[in-house]
Image (cartoon, helix red, strand yellow):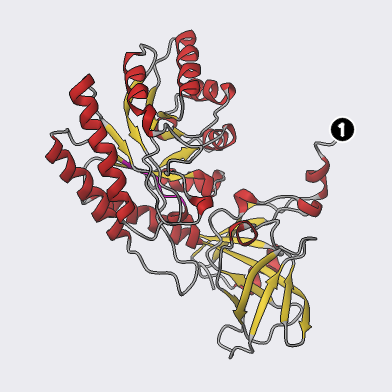
Amino acid sequence: MIGGCDTLKLAQEFGTPLYVFDEFTLRTRCAEFKTEFGRRYDPVTVLYASKAFINRALALILEEEGMGLDVVSAGEMGIARAAGFPMERVFLHGNNKSAGELEMALELGIGRIVVDNFHEMSLLSDMARQKGKTPAILLRLSPGVDPHTHRYNTTGIIDSKFGFSLFAWEEAVTRAMKDPNLDLAGLHFHLGSLIFEVEPYREAIGVVLKFAEEMKRKHGFEMAELDTGGGFAVRYTVEDPVVPLSDYADVITSAVSGLCRELGLFLPRLIIEPGRAIVGQAGMALYRVGVVKDIPNVRRYVSVDGGMGDNIRHALYGAKHEAVVAGKAAEPNAGKVTIAGKYCESGDILITDIDLPPTCAGDVLAVADCGAYCLPMASNYNAAFKPAVVLVRDGQARLIRRRETLEDLTRYDV
């Protein structure tokens, strides 16, 4: 069951692979972030990191919950606009924004543009001057803090494609302050994703706030906003540690308020950017089992009708998921199996060595915690159709994205 709906009936009605999102979980997580951070610090802005997963239906829910949006492309900006999302609550990120994306941001009146490098700063300044606009910006700093996560999920270390490196921080601030076409509102950093430790946040906040104090003393810079990014972890397996949201909120808010008082800085607006932590556990993937292959004394493969085409996380960086056989969750396990996809790659594996009950062709496999970074990285490898998506609540299911068709795959051929 998810959202009061029977997963076997959902698979029958909408087909498989099928992604199912629980509306109650989505709304509850939004409220939890606003409450946990808001009761410890004021003012706080909570942005949803759209790269985790976004479509128009989800954008409407986020708008109703009073969230902002962190977007990284013209496409994500376009989805927000198509959903009628307030553009002043949208922040544009990205390490290599195109001229077209910056122009679109200026035309839409995006709330903040997070400037990543000097090239972008110059490009944006020229464009703003030509259009007679003065966009509010944050500078993305790379604080050189290791968050102890997978190297593909690390973004705040010195060797990173993201943000201004330490040696360039002062020049970035002084250039932005002197530029009449830009309004420097504050500073931003993002350490990475799936961060199970809270201390890296404290360390990075210390580095950035001490720099802000130095810039205030030397150049009169007043930091009105501090964006500490996201990276809040969710449990994908029962072995993963439990890190309560309150732990992140305690460390981040106390570090900012305490150090600001110590350094004589005004309390800035605090901005956070959860993505996975809101949508990750709200999503479930349903697959239909096909071939079951036994290799005696080696492995038992259970193949499903999806795989790396809709969830590349395991193949990309060894991500793990839990799963149950729908309708058989209470039955005793029959041993370890490996869940394989249907794509023509040996690396097309969803889950390696999971204990499941006896599983046969026609069964429905329900894979938990598929709400984040599955659909956004989906592909049409082997000319496969991207799956349908449904939203469930109180026993009712509604289609929020239809399954792709052959016409969709060929409509761009010329």
Q: Nearer the viewer, residue 177 or 10?
A: 177
Q: Tag count in the figure?
A: 1
The percent coordinates of residue 366 (x first, y second) are 61, 71
The N terminus lies in quadrant:
bottom right
Q: Relative to residue 127, is residue 411 depicted above or below?
A: below
Of helix, strand and loop, which mostly describes the magenta segment?
loop
Q: Is residue 222 visible?
A: no
> In the rendered structure, which segment of residues is drawn in magenta?
271-275
Q: Give the residue at x 15% y 36%.
A: 263
Residue furthest out toward the right: 414
Q: Give the residue at x 24% y 55%.
A: 250
Horizontally, is 326 left or right of 235 in the view? right
Q: Amino acid at mark 1?
A: Val
Horizontally, is 334 left or right of 292 in the view? left
Q: Give the residue at x 50% y 56%.
A: 150
Q: Nearer the viewer, residue 280 or 411?
A: 280
Q: Nearer the viewer, residue 92 or 126?
A: 126
The percent coordinates of residue 157 (x first, y second) are 42, 44
Residue 274 located within the stretch drawn in magenta: yes
The percent coordinates of residue 339 (x first, y second) are 68, 72
Residue 163 located within the stretch drawn in magenta: no
The C terminus lies in quadrant:
top right
Q: Which residue does the numbered mark 1 point to in the structure image? A: 414
